[in-house]
Amino acid sequence: MKPSSVVGVFVGITLVKLALAAVWGETADITNIFEQGRGFVAGRDILDAQATGGHPSFFPMGNYLLATACLVVSQALHVPFAFAVKVPAILADLCIAFLLRASPRGGERAAWWYLVNPVTFLLAVYHGQLHTVAVAILVLSVCVAERGRPGLSGAALALAASIRQHFAGLLVPLLRGAGSRWPIALASCAAVGVALNVRLLASAHLDRLLAPTLLYGKWGYTLLLLQGARLLGLLGLDTLKTVPAALTQWLDAYAIAPYVIWTLGYWVWSVRQGASLDLWKATLLFLVGLYVVSPGFGMQWLVWAVPFWLVVNRRQAMWYSFLAGTFLAGSYWQWTLNGKYGVASITEDLGRLSRFDLAGVVAVGAVGLATWGWCVRGWWRLLRDPRSA
């Protein structure tokens, strides 16, 4: 396909996504981002949940600057905030597609599959979230690092980590990949990171940036521990819930531990790679590792790995996208049951569900476990051989 035709198709898909975003509902996260923007404009302590609508997530300054920009644009153009907040993710998807197309490791097929991916589509057009913007900047960081521009790569990583602090764990492989020019990458990353986040130094809750944002029991092994135990209780097998309950209490109390252990181990792995370090593989390994160890989850996390997996192994990425997209769509359906049955959390009231709805909830959980299992498989294969990831 001619370059001009590719651009036309990509822009056309983006316009369709923008049109759908204007009419296709919203999630509770949009309200949370709205409150984050309002809290920032009001000059409140944005690391105090009560200052941002009671939302339990704590992010660096880039998140709140984006939220505020969406709020300002919404008010200036008199468009619904629910639409304004979806636009950055949709445009970020387009940017990622062009970055993948321009990368020798990606190409047109990777760009195409990213743009029509069910995960990227649902999260951008319906969910309303800022993660995709951080991912786009992270992809840029890897792309320019491959071109031997450590200063720009370090600055881009700082920007990405200033939206989602999880990405700061990628500094070590970035420095390792920069070779003898690592001081340039470190200096630019530090300068941009400090400049962007200096306002946070006045917060009395700065330590909260180190606390993971959790929806405990919604993902992976904790989904099995928490929701599985509830299902056993519904079947009258309460005596089997003792061990899961004890593990749940421990994981809930020490939720940060899996992240710290994985990140430290990953840094050691990165250093030991030496000159053979592959930044695409290294980035994907870190992100999938976060999926594997996380005792909690935000559905928006599902987009993090997509562009990197498409570069490392397109076939495996497509399987991941199918599973994750199905889990995402099923979760949206499951959330509607809260309103249908008038409860805060349907999984806490499984006994109220009809047989059909209960079967649906179990199926969504099963697909979620399958998605997590695929990530475990990919994580292990990445450690052994990037070509089979």
Image: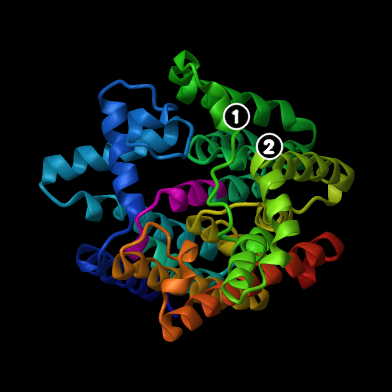
314 or 255, which lies in front? 255
Where does the image place residue 180, in percent across and percent down from the top left?
79, 32
- Quarter of the rendering occupied by the C terminus: bottom right
Count residues near mark 2 (Cα–Cα under 10 Å), then give few for <14, some for 14-19, many for 20+. Answer: some
Residue type at numbered disc 2? Leu
Residue 65 seen in this snapshot: yes
Horizontal relation, residue 60 to residue 8: left or right: right
Residue drawn 65% across the image and 36% down it: 150
Describe the element under mark 1 as helix, strand or loop.
helix
Residue type at numbered disc 1? Cys
- Quarter of the rendering occupied by the N terminus: bottom left
1 or 56, which lies in front? 56
Where does the image place residue 337, in percent across and percent down from the top left?
36, 70
Residue 105 seen in this snapshot: no
* Residue 132 on the magenta segment: yes
Residue behind mark 2 = 171
Tag on residue 172? none
Query: Cβ–Cβ below 8 Å for labels 1 and 2?
Result: yes
Q: Which residues are magenta?
A: 125-138
Horizontal relation, residue 108 to residue 353: left or right: right
Horizontal relation, residue 221 to residue 160: left or right: right
Which quadrant would residue 363 be assigned to in this image? bottom right
Residue behind mark 1 = 189
Q: Tell me which label, 1 or 2, sits earlier in the chain.
A: 2
Residue drawn 52% across the image and 41% down it: 164
207 or 89, which lies in front? 207
